[in-house]
Amino acid sequence: MKNTRDFKNIFKTLFRNIIVYLFPPQCPYCEKIIDSEQILCDECFHKIHFIHAPKCYWCSVPLPIETDTGEKMLCAKCLSKRPLYDMARSAFVYDIFSRQLILKFKYYDRTDLRHILVHYLLKAGIDLFDKTDLVIPVPMYWLRRLKRQYNQSAVLAELLARKIHKEYNGSVLYRTHHTESQTHKTAKERKQNLTDAFQVRNAELIQGKRILLIDDVLTTGATAESCAKVLKKNGAKAVYVLTMARSVKK
Ligand SMILES: [Zn+2]
Ligand SMILES: [Zn+2]
């Protein structure tokens, strides 16, 4: 019996080594071979601009280092008008490097990257998880999802919910119609573009709940605010936002 188990274990280790030898782990960004415990190669890792303190307590935009008082600080935008969501956190600054990573995940069928991205989301959103009851993604219009095959935010939200042991719902919030790409729009145009774009089905599922909304990039915050507005109108107690990246005005 023991011999059979030993034989099985030896076979398993051998098999694993052959797989690693044939398909060595690669840096998802530059495809250089990396160690199995590495996430990105050293060179690419140093190109990521992680967001850390000092940052705005509400929207998480990085603040100039000299303003760091160790207290809860707010950026000028949040000071002039509080966002409709309660707090937003992002893992890294949206720049040429993080854009590549997100594009690969979004359009090149690289859902395997979800593990790396969720690893960073877990770090970035650490102060939100205790306050979370339900995790939901920013929805994609159903026709678009059919074409794309997956909603990248839903892939991340589902895995993250599992990791933090919270409930997940991928359908309670939905898009009522296709909205044009927000990329080249001004803040005002973004808001107009999103008017009535989101709706809640089965509002009883979010009553009194603190929701963690997952998206890929926070730009002006218009999408996050539209979702937060409709979720709160339908009974959500709080809406927190967690994204992979957020843009930072130079
Ligand atoms: Zn690399
Ligand atoms: Zn802010």
Image (cartoon, rainbow, N blue to C red):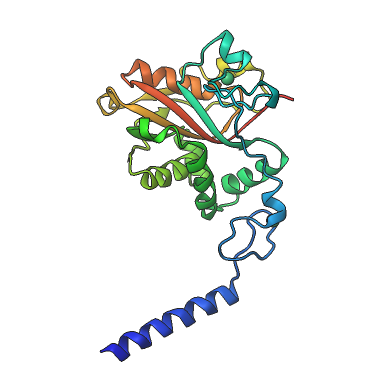
Query: Which residue is outermost to the top?
Result: 80
Report whether residue 179 is seen. yes
- Of 200 and 164, which appears nearest the observer? 164
Question: Residue, x 61% and y 35% (percent of image)?
Answer: 51
Decide if residue 41 is on the left or right side of residue 138.
right
- Of 149 and 6, which appears nearest the observer? 6
- Expressed as whole percent of the image width and height from the top left, the position of residue 187 reads 63, 17
Question: Residue, x 52% and y 24% (percent of image)?
Answer: 223
Q: Quadrant of ligand 2?
A: top right
- Expressed as whole percent of the image width and height from the top left, the position of residue 156 reads 47, 44
- Expressed as whole percent of the image width and height from the top left, the position of residue 31 reads 68, 60
Question: Residue, x 47% and y 16% (percent of image)?
Answer: 84
Query: Which residue is outermost to the right?
Result: 250
Question: Residue, x 36% and y 30% (percent of image)?
Answer: 131
Q: Which corner quadrant holds the N terminus?
A: bottom left
Query: Which residue is outermost to the front?
Result: 69
Query: How many labels, in total?
Result: 0
In the rendered view, tell whether residue 161 sits above or below residue 211.
Answer: below
Report whether residue 197 is seen. no
Q: Quadrant of residue 69?
A: top right
- Of 87 and 232, which appears nearest the observer? 87
Decide if residue 166 is on the left or right side of residue 105.
left
In the rendered view, tell whether residue 80 sits above or below residue 211.
Answer: above
Decide if residue 53 is on the left or right side of residue 209.
right
